[in-house]
Image: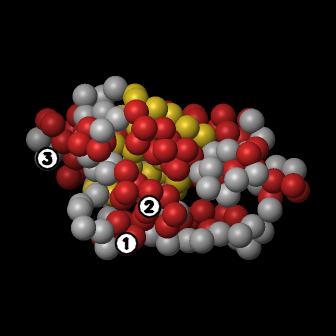
């Protein structure tokens, strides 16, 4: 996936610049939620759902280790709540901001929830370089999984990859029980 270049942004219509500024703001918020997950003793993953009017609807942090439930990724926790609270047609106009590229399980949940747009920080490729083989991982590209669906989901990322990587560098010093 190619990154937007500075020249492209400068030549963009005003609405495009506003969208990029909003993406940066909400992605940084997702990074903060991820740091909170780490502070609570879990892996640093965070997700934020934002309406098309710029209102934060829901935020969720990873709770996989805290709950001993392998499905409690930040995205799946957020999407379960969103599916209960909001109709699908509203979710199709929302953006999900996540500090890391959603795994294949989370990409499936994004598709089934009907969320129309995803913006992520660190790519799965870069995350794999950071965590190596220390823990079980199922790496795949979110955009590739979502492209196989019957309705479109826009995927933007990686953005702020080095900034997003910092939470994982710091998270690598977690107790051995959490490294599994």
Image quarter (top left, top right, bottom left or bottom right) of the C terminus: bottom right
- Tag 3–tag 1 contact (CB < 8 Å): no
Nearer mark to the viewer, of 2 and 3: 2
Residue ID for mark 1: 144
In the drawing, does residue 17 fall left or right of residue 39?
Answer: left
Q: Residue furthest right?
A: 176
- Tag 2–tag 3 contact (CB < 8 Å): no
Q: Of marks 3 and 1, which one's residue comes earlier in the chain?
A: 3
| Distance Cα–Cα, label 3 vs label 1 | 29 Å
Residue ID for mark 3: 11
In the drawing, does residue 34 fall left or right of residue 92?
Answer: right
Q: What residue is rendered at 62% in x and 50% in y?
A: 72
Q: Of marks 1 and 2, which one's residue comes earlier in the chain?
A: 2
Q: How is the image coloured?
A: secondary structure
Above or below for 158 versus 80: below
Above or below for 176 versus 19: below
Where does residue 45 sit, x and y in percent of width and height?
60, 47
Q: Secondary structure at mark 2?
A: helix
Q: Of marks 2 and 3, which one's residue comes earlier in the chain?
A: 3
Where does residue 75 sit, x and y in percent of width and height?
51, 48
Q: What residue is rendered at 60% in x and 40% in y?
A: 61
Q: Secondary structure at mark 1?
A: helix
Give the quadrant of residue 130.
Answer: bottom right
Q: Is residue 68 visible?
A: yes
Where does residue 64 sit, x and y in percent of width and height?
69, 50
In the drawing, does residue 101 fall left or right of residue 50?
Answer: right
Q: Is residue 46 visible?
A: no
Looking at the rendered structure, which numbered label has been put on residue 107?
2
Q: What residue is rendered at 44% in x and 61% in y?
A: 107
């Amino acid at each position: 996936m190619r990154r937007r270049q500075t020249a492209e942004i400068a030549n963009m219509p005003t609405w495009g610049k506003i969208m990029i500024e909003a993406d940066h703001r909400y992605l940084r918020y997702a990074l903060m939620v991820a740091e909170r997950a780490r502070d609570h003793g879990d892996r640093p993953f965070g997700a934020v759902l934002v309406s098309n009017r710029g209102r934060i609807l829901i935020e969720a942090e990873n709770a996989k280790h805290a709950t001993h439930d392998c499905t409690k990724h930040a995205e799946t926790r957020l999407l379960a709540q969103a599916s209960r609270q909001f109709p699908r047609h509203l979710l199709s106009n929302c953006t999900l901001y996540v500090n890391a590229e959603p795994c294949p399980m989370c990409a499936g949940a994004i598709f089934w929830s009907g969320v129309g747009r995803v913006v992520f920080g660190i790519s799965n490729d870069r995350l794999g370089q950071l965590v190596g083989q220390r823990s079980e991982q199922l790496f795949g590209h979110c955009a590739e999984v979502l492209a196989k669906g019957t309705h479109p989901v826009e995927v933007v990322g990686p953005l702020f990859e080095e900034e997003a990587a910092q939470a994982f560098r710091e998270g690598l010093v977690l107790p051995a029980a959490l490294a599994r």
